Image (cartoon, rainbow, N blue to C red):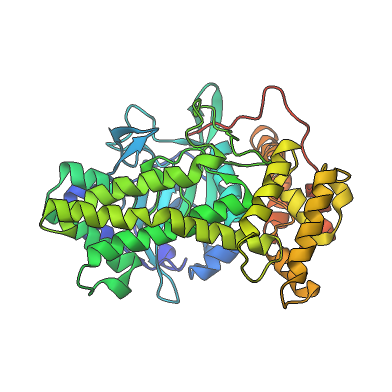
Amino acid sequence: MTKGKAIIETGWNLDSSYARLPKLFFTRLNPIPVRSPKLIILNYPLAASLGLNVQALQSKDGVAALAGNRINEGALPLAQAYAGHQFGHFALLGDGRALLLGEQITPLGKRVDIQLKGSGQTPYSRQGDGRAALGPMLREYIISEAMHALGIATTRSLAVVTTGESVIRETELPGAILTRVAASHLRVGTFQYVSEWGTVEDLRVLADYTLQRHFPDVFDAENRYLLLLQEVIKRQAELIAKWQMVGFIHGVMNTDNMALSGETIDYGPCAFMDVYDPATVFSSIDVQGRYAYGNQPPIAGWNLARFAETLLPLLHVNEEQAVIMAQDAISHFTELYYCNWLAGMRGKLGIFNEEIQDESLIESLLSMMQKYRADYTNTFRALTFDTLEDTVLFGITEFAQWHEQWQARLGRQQEPKASSHQLMRNCNPALIPRNNQVEAALEAAVKQGDYSVMERLLDVLSSPYAHSPEQADYFTLPALSTPPYRTFCGT
């Protein structure tokens, strides 16, 4: 591995502030070179926003850097250590197949993590090979970019390269490496790790670093660690509400998969809900439904309580007082989430102001959608464009009565119907990454080497609120499958 002039010309402007933290937090090592890297997809708009030269990234040297075969100037690759509650059980974890290369300083002065996922074994691999298969890496690319277009905070995908090597899972699969961009990879699990195996001073260093990265405005506050907890709670309340707005199901909301920046992170067995049902689970390993759609808000609160526990030594010198402060902060999560959710649902129904009956109006609609197995996305799209005949609710008496109540509700606000319609267009996506469409794109790419299906899907997903005629082919619902659709963590 070399550093060279060709790499600098790509526009990389890397710093490695995380590498300057205590050695407890990470292990320094380089990616394991791969046989013959080939660029499969490159995110041109993201690359440009990062200040990167897209032509140079596609060169031999540029692709080598995206594969980990070359190290960019300023990079100090490392595997981050963290812990986490996985399905409620605490475990020592860490980057088992990923390396943080460093932080790109963008032309606007923003600092973002650049991480290679699938770059080889680390001390945290736990008997894994440290590699990734092409399908799951393309899946993360598709879903994370769709989430970004939906206006939901998320890690981004810069590129996917194949390695020219196979990985063995249940079968032999083509290997790949994803280049992931994130505000940071600081997690609840990062604090759990330092709380369990570090000192209070280590914890303070980590907390200060987190504040400087994500909440610099409160760094000089009297109790900045309490404000850190409160700000993380606020961001998660907003994030989870936005998940619920579009029917997104993360699938594995372990504490190590909750980013303190408020971004959605680690797209494994995630999927989007078709038929509305709070009990919807797609992940094959979530046999108890711990991370079902309807459980995501309370699980987020549970995860945040684990974060609060790690901060107790910093909140107050008196442990009892620290616990009281933490409990008070956590107690506000449910209300914050609910306020975000209710505001979002009002927007989806074209409601600008607030009435006490709004919750009942919303819950009645959701109850009918569940009862009659109505599609979540398409129902709100039909309400937006008054194409009710396209939904299974059309012709049902109780829905007709609800519709009258909704129209009366819209009539009690000052804003005209045209404004309500525009609000609904802005809040209700025309389409989501339908599970069958994502699977079709991945199958064509992995099995036939045909990336055109994925490229078309990415194109329509990039403008979910356009409501354009070109998107119509992606409205169609998949046929009900037996057994139900299942997703897998996939590495």
Identified at 34% across, 53% down, the residue is 330
Left or right of 393: which side holds 238? left
- Find residue 210 and report its horizontal and vertical position in percent: 29, 61
Spot the residue most to the front. 356
Identified at 75% across, 67% down, the residue is 410
- Find residue 367 and report its horizontal and vertical position in percent: 68, 43
- Find residue 160 and report its horizontal and vertical position in percent: 54, 48
Foreground pick, 27 / 409: 409
Foreground pick, 252 / 161: 252
Q: Taking the image as drawn, is residue 102 in sight?
A: yes
Foreground pick, 401 / 468: 401
Q: Is residue 130 above or below residue 235?
A: above
Q: Is residue 407 above or below residue 437?
A: below
- Find residue 171 and report its horizontal and vertical position in percent: 55, 22
Q: Taking the image as drawn, is residue 60 in sight?
A: no
Identified at 89% across, 44% down, the residue is 395
Left or right of 65: which side holds 347? right
The tally of labels here is: 0
Foreground pick, 348 / 242: 348
Identified at 48% across, 47% down, the residue is 297
Left or right of 280: which side holds 208? left
Residue 110 figure quarter: bottom left
